[in-house]
Amino acid sequence: MCIGIPMQVEQINLGRALCRDIDGNSRWIDIQLVEPVTTDQWLLVFLEAAREVISQERAEQVNRALKAMSAVMQGQGFDEALFADLTEREPQLPPHLQAQFDQQKQNN
């Protein structure tokens, strides 16, 4: 399983950026798939390469989910508030699946 880690850009240099994670750890990340980026932007990083530029709000959501996942992996419980972006709304299907669902509902 590959898990994306939010990281904030600190410095940019020729196709890579020095980025910091929520714990304050910094490392060089390949940014060629998301260029151009600017200092202070948030990136979703997989295997030392940025795959997406994300908002600070999205970075906070992902970091909360990672915190909950870490707690579960250590045998601890977790606070459902860590998934507030999921628990405070109705689940939504992607448009192509919603259309199929609506069609089946009409046929029954």
Image (tube, rainbow, N blue to C red):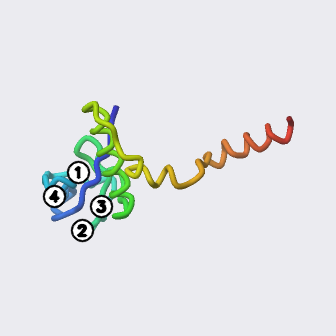
Vertical side of 24 occupied by 103: above or below: above
Q: Where does the N terminus fall, quadrant-wise?
A: top left
Q: Which residue is mark 2?
A: 40
The amino acid marked with disc number 2 is Asp
Q: Which residue is mark 1?
A: 30
At 19% across and 58% down in the image, what residue appears?
A: 17
Q: Which residue is mark 4?
A: 18
The amino acid marked with disc number 1 is Asp
Residue 14, image x, y percentages: 18, 60
Of label 4 and label 1, which has the lower sequence position?
4
Q: Please identify, in this view, whether the residue under mark 4 or under mark 1 is nearer the observer.
A: 4
State yes or no: discs 4 and 3 in contact (Cβ < 8 Å).
no
Residue 70, image x, y percentages: 27, 39
User: What crowding class fits label 2: few (fewer than 14 Cα within 10 Å), some (14-19), or many (20 or more)?
Assistant: some
Q: Which residue is mark 3?
A: 42
Q: Is residue 43 left or right of residue 17?
A: right
User: What crowding class fits label 4: few (fewer than 14 Cα within 10 Å), some (14-19), or many (20 or more)?
Assistant: some
State yes or no: discs 3 and 2 in contact (Cβ < 8 Å).
no
Q: Is residue 108 left or right of residue 14?
A: right
Of label 2 and label 1, which has the lower sequence position?
1
- Separation (CA) of disc 4 from disc 1: 9 Å
State yes or no: discs 4 and 1 in contact (Cβ < 8 Å).
no
- Separation (CA) of disc 3 from disc 2: 7 Å
At 20% across and 51% down in the image, what residue appears?
A: 29
SS label for mark 3: strand
